[in-house]
Amino acid sequence: MRVDFARLDRAFNPKVVAVVGDKATSGYMWLRGQMGFSGKLYSVQVDPNEFEGIKALGVPNYASLMDIPEPVDLVIVAVPRPVALRILEDCIKKDVAAAHFFTSGFAETDTEDGKRLQATMKQRSEETNFHLVGPNCMGLYNPSVGIRQTPRQVTGFKGPVGFISQSGTHAITFSEEAYMQGLEVNKSVSFGNGTVLDCTDFLEYFAIVSR
């Protein structure tokens, strides 16, 4: 796949973010994590039991990505595995710049079902040149625009350090410990299974944006 670094930059510096599938059982982790986001934040959720909780956060909710009335730069996907491919197809149709799939249960499980679904997502992404981060990852952190991997991360600054990690725990821990030691992160990524975008792609992107 040809990496479009302009699209990747849109994802790291989004004006519009959509969180798909966040739930009360996780404490609305992904929606709360983007509460300090400087752009527009939307939710996509079809479960009526979640509507009031999302409304209480002050986030507009839609039944589908396709219903969001403007272009979307970054989608954070937290749906069950059986729904993941359908959400990927919506991201492709919506011409989203990139999507971070927190959803797990793919090749990392070493099961035939998981490996087969991951291979299908990889194939569809490569056919359409779609920039998929993950799956099974904590995604992007850009403190200057308020995009976070966890609600604990600090925002509102633009440091000199880029951090690339397969592990979400390592990415989050590094950003938190670095901040406490006076070292501020510029951008960070946890890429999980690295199905489409891998460490070398993010390293090249960080080199480009640091010029």
Image: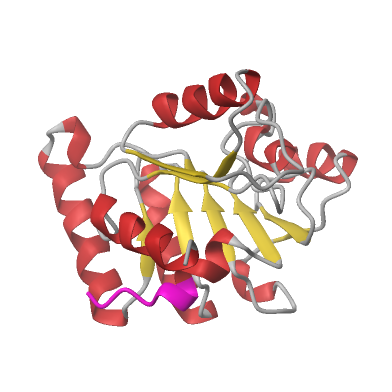
In the rendered structure, the answer to whether residue 8 lies left or right of residue 82 reads: right
Quadrant where the N terminus lies?
Answer: bottom left
- Please provide percent x and percent y for residue 66: 61, 75
Q: Which residues are magenta?
A: 1-7
- Please provide percent x and percent y for residue 2: 26, 78
In the rendered structure, the answer to whether residue 190 lies left or right of residue 68 reads: left
In the rendered structure, the answer to whether residue 164 lies left or right of residue 57 reads: left
**Residue 84 vs residue 209, the one in the foreground:** 209
- Please provide percent x and percent y for residue 42: 73, 58
In the figure, 172 relative to 193: above or below? above
- Which corner quadrant of the image does residue 105 belong to? top left
- Please provide percent x and percent y for residue 49: 73, 38
- What scheme was used to colour the molecule? secondary structure
State the residue at coordinates (26%, 60%). Answer: 196
User: How many numbered markers are drawn?
Assistant: 0
**Residue 192 vs residue 209, the one in the foreground:** 209
In the figure, 89 relative to 49: above or below? below
User: Is residue 54 visible to us here?
Assistant: yes
In the rendered structure, the answer to whether residue 178 lies left or right of residue 67 reads: left
In the figure, 192 relative to 77: above or below? above
State the residue at coordinates (35%, 31%). Answer: 167
- Which corner quadrant of the image does residue 61 belong to? bottom right
State the residue at coordinates (41%, 64%). Answer: 88
**Does the magenta portion include 6?**
yes
State the residue at coordinates (10%, 42%). Answer: 112
**Does the magenta portion include 197?**
no
User: Is residue 195 visible to us here?
Assistant: no
**Residue 96 vs residue 186, the one in the foreground:** 186
